[in-house]
Amino acid sequence: MKIFLAGATGVIGMRLVRLMLAEGHVIAAMTRTPAKIEGLRAAGATPILCDVFDQEALSAAVKGFRPDLVVHQVTDLPDQIENLAEFLPRNNRVRSEGTQNLLAAAQAANSSGFVAQSIAWRTGPGTGPILDAHENSVVAAGGVVLRYGLFYGPETFFENELPPHPRIHVDDAARRTTPFLAGKRGIFTITEDDATS
């Protein structure tokens, strides 16, 4: 399968690149960071330098690759959890404008599938109408929403401690994502406690 992975150098995206390539998929791996291009190429993916907010360039990149599936793992989060509050407006923009741009690009490229990241906790900062609209637009387009628990493990906010429930080790989250690349539709939960919802 040809997969366009947006957010390929994020904490879960970089794990998905390895898993997808190991399964024999052909991957276009999108990042907005020029310094990460060579690492994606070395991993065996086709690197795409693009910003999810540049609708014209994004549409051209997706259409040029002609993927069977578009996977939306884009976030805009800080390296330190203490700075999360100041990043939330940007992350909300990813879920609103960014999601709409990716859905439009997938449609223009006649992609048959769309998978998007979401969150399993339903209260607190980063939830509410923007998150609901993000999920609803993906489902309305016939796509899959994956509600992940709080990630813990290497390169996460919780490298050396367990976060509260709902949670999931980031390696397990990536591994449990791959079955959803093959056509399931709807909203699913990926946590330590749930297989699906």
Image (spheres, rainbow, N blue to C red):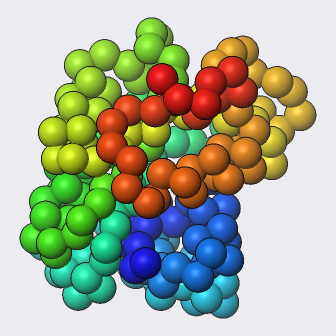
Q: Quadrant of the N terminus?
A: bottom left
Q: Residue furthest top?
A: 123
Q: For residue 102, which quarter of the picture?
A: bottom left
Residue 35 appears in the picture as rendered: no
| Residue depicted at 33% across the width and 43% down the height | 185
- Looking at the rendered structure, the number of numbered marks drawn on it comes to 0
**On the picture, is 85 further left or further right than 17?**
left
Image x and y of residue 2, in percent: 40, 79
Residue 150 against residue 103 in the figure, above or below: above
**On the picture, is 62 further left or further right than 156?**
left
**On the picture, is 12 further left or further right than 161?**
left
**On the picture, is 123 further left or further right than 62?**
right
Image x and y of residue 46, in percent: 47, 87
Image x and y of residue 93, in percent: 27, 40
Q: Residue furthest right?
A: 160
| Residue depicted at 43% across the width and 67% down the height | 5
Residue toward you, 191 or 112: 112
| Residue depicted at 37% across the width and 55% down the height | 183
Q: For residue 127, which quarter of the picture?
A: top left
Residue 35 against residue 41 in the figure, above or below: above
Residue 29 against residue 11 in the figure, above or below: below
Residue toward you, 162 or 57: 162
Image x and y of residue 89, in percent: 34, 32
Residue 16 against residue 61 in the figure, above or below: above
| Residue depicted at 66% across the width and 84% down the height | 43
Q: For residue 166, which quarter of the picture?
A: top right
Residue 164 appears in the picture as rendered: yes
